[in-house]
Image (tube, rainbow, N blue to C red):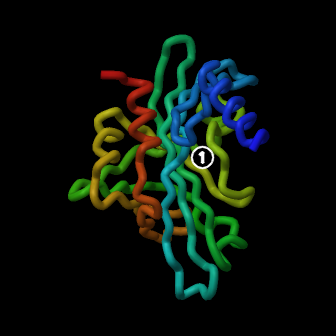
Amino acid sequence: MLHARCAVTVLLALCAGGCVIPQRDAAREVLDPDTGATVTAMGTALEFYSPRPDLGLQAASFAQLGAMETNRMGERRLLLWLSVLPGGAAAQQDQAEIPKSLTIVSGTAEHRPALVASAAGDIGLSRTPFKRPGDWAHDAYFDVDLDQLREFVTADPLALVITSADGSVQRYELWKPERGSLAQFIEKIAPE
């Protein structure tokens, strides 16, 4: 009984003392240690999947899409980070599923953002601000604007169509419908 009272007292003291528990979806701002650029990024990237039953068991491919803003001495740029994690035999092929173009299906609209780079170094960063899903994942960065991001928060469906370096085209469906991370990112960079 005494231990329970102590635990409750400690918990109340932490809450009253301003203890803040970070939210998983909260947008975050980081300073790139090597380039000095400030990067604001979604707390959690959106996750997409593409089943590949033709390739056997556990052959689904996954993609993550995260919004980010770079800031170099007041020069801001909105970008989408795309990371594709191939499944099955495709994971062993060098050119398989390396993204070369992206179509974002947003409700009845389709957006084809311009490919900017295939590596963080090409956009002036030493590393991506997102946790990559695997060492063998293929990354790409695309231009995006604020109106498009706002549309993506509520679009139904929201899907990706990725054309790879080998010419293959694959559709990815939104795996988890929660898009709070994107909404919080938009609120951080463009509060209304």
Residue furthest toward the top?
73
Residue furthest toward the right?
3
The amino acid pointed to by label 1 is Ser
Q: Quadrant of residue 9?
A: top right
Residue 170, given in percent of the width and then of the height, sits at: 46, 70
Q: Going 29% across and 49% down the picture, which residue do you hit?
A: 154
92 or 27, which is in the foreground?
Answer: 27
Does residue 157 appear left or right of residue 115 in this picture? left
Residue 133, given in percent of the width and then of the height, sits at: 66, 56
Question: How many numbered discs, if any?
Answer: 1
Q: Going 47% across and 21% down the picture, which residue do you hit?
A: 76
Label 1 secondary element: loop
128 or 192, which is in the foreground?
Answer: 192
What residue sits right under mark 1 in the picture? 118
182 or 55, which is in the foreground?
Answer: 182
- Taking 30 as reference, is 83 above or below it? below
Q: Going 62% across and 63% down the picture, which residue do you hit?
A: 85
Residue 181, given in percent of the width and then of the height, sits at: 46, 42
122 or 108, which is in the foreground?
Answer: 108
Does residue 113 appear left or right of residue 165 in this picture? left
- Taking 51 as reference, is 163 above or below it? above
- Taking 189 as reference, is 182 above or below it? below
Residue 36, given in percent of the width and then of the height, sits at: 68, 18
Q: Quadrant of residue 3?
A: top right
Does residue 152 appear left or right of residue 9 in this picture? left
Q: Quadrant of the N terminus?
A: top right
Residue furthest toward the front?
1
Q: Quadrant of the C terminus?
A: top left
Q: Going 69% across and 66% down the picture, which residue do you hit?
A: 94
Q: Residues within 10 Å of mark 1 (few under 14, many from 20)?
A: some
